[in-house]
Each structure stands twice: as C-alpha cells, then as structure tokens.
Image (cartoon, rainbow, N blue to C red):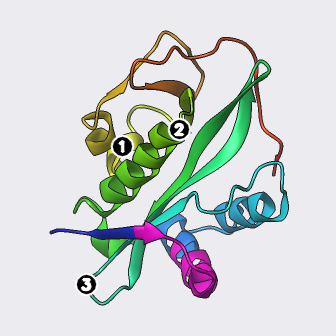
Amino acid sequence: MSWNTRVETPSDLEILRALTREAFGRQFEVDFLDAHRADPAAWIPGLMFVATTPEDRPVAYALLTRCHIGDVPVLSLGPVAVLPAYQRQGAGGAAVRAALATARDRVEPAVVVLGHAEYYPRFGFRQATEFGVHHPQYDGPNLMALALGDRAVPQGDLTYPVTV
C-alpha cells in the first residue's frame, strides 16, 4: 500500500493520543508523548510525521524530539506508533522515512533511536535503514545512534530533557 505522509496538525492531537494508546496498549507512551509536547526543550514543532490513509486518517506516526550526545544537540526518534491493523504494511516505515528525510534536510548530525534490534521491524525501522541511514560505532543498551548521510555521530553521554 502507498502511504501519504505529512506533518501533524493541531486537529490530529486526540487521534494521535488514541493511536498511541491502541498501538502500545498502555498509558505510559501517551504520558511520554504528552510530557514531550509540554517541554519546549524537547518538542520541536513540525517534527511529528503521520502516515495516513487516502482519506487522511492517521494510522501511524514518527516523532522526533531533541536530545544531546555530549554537548551536541541531536534528534531522538521515538516513539513510532502504528495502529495494530496497519502494522507490517509500511505505514510506520513511511512516517519514519519522512521524519529522517526532514532531519537530514535540517542538517542534523544524528538521530538516536530507542528500543532494540528485534523491536524495530515491528514499527517500520527496517525500511528506514534502507533509506540510506548508516549505523555508526555509537550504541548502548536499548539504543543506537544513526548517522544521517556522511555525517559523523557525536560521542558522549546521552541526555534527554524529558524523563517520564
């Protein structure tokens, strides 16, 4: 299936909260999303991308927020949510590719991805890695950083402005 992607709109908020709850099956991820929205150090308007049906119904999203590796600002990808009925159909991958293309266009050095290798395919990450993302030498427990294009990934401690 071919997916439309776009930046979220204010009218999407409640739909995306419900999508998050249904995709993950628990409130923690909704609280995580709300905490990021509430923090101007984390939330960057225009960096939440939705994949929609032809009728413009959001069925997946990818969210980029701000974090730091050492003192270098980078982006964090997470969460990526896909309605269960649309998983493994490319909706998550479409949203992730739109997010990473925008990050690359913004000349971001890297994107940190939360999760682990077995988790990524469920939410479209395999397609994103085929989009020209390179795996650098930086990784840690349950996360990895992806270089965008030929840029080097910064080294150092990973910090987030928001913790839930």
Q: Which residue in the protein does label 2 denote? A: 115
Classify 10 Å Cα crowding around label 1: few (below 14), some (14-19), many (20 and above): many
Determine whether the residue tagged by mark 1 lies in a helix, strand or loop. Answer: helix
Whether residue 111 is visible to the viewer of this picture, yes or no, is yes
Choose the circle earlier in sequence order: 3 or 2: 3
Asked if the residues shown at circle 3 and circle 2 are in contact, with their CB atoms under 8 angstroms apart, the answer is: no
Quarter of image, res 128: top left
Q: Which residues are magenta?
A: 6-19
Q: Is residue 102 above or below residue 13?
A: above
The N terminus sits in image quarter: bottom left
Residue 56 to residue 17: above or below: below
Q: Earlier in the sequence, mark 2 or mark 1?
A: 2
The three-letter code of the residue at mark 3 reads: Pro
Q: Is residue 66 above or below residue 107?
A: below
Q: What SS does tag 2 mark?
A: loop
Q: Tag on residue 54?
A: 3
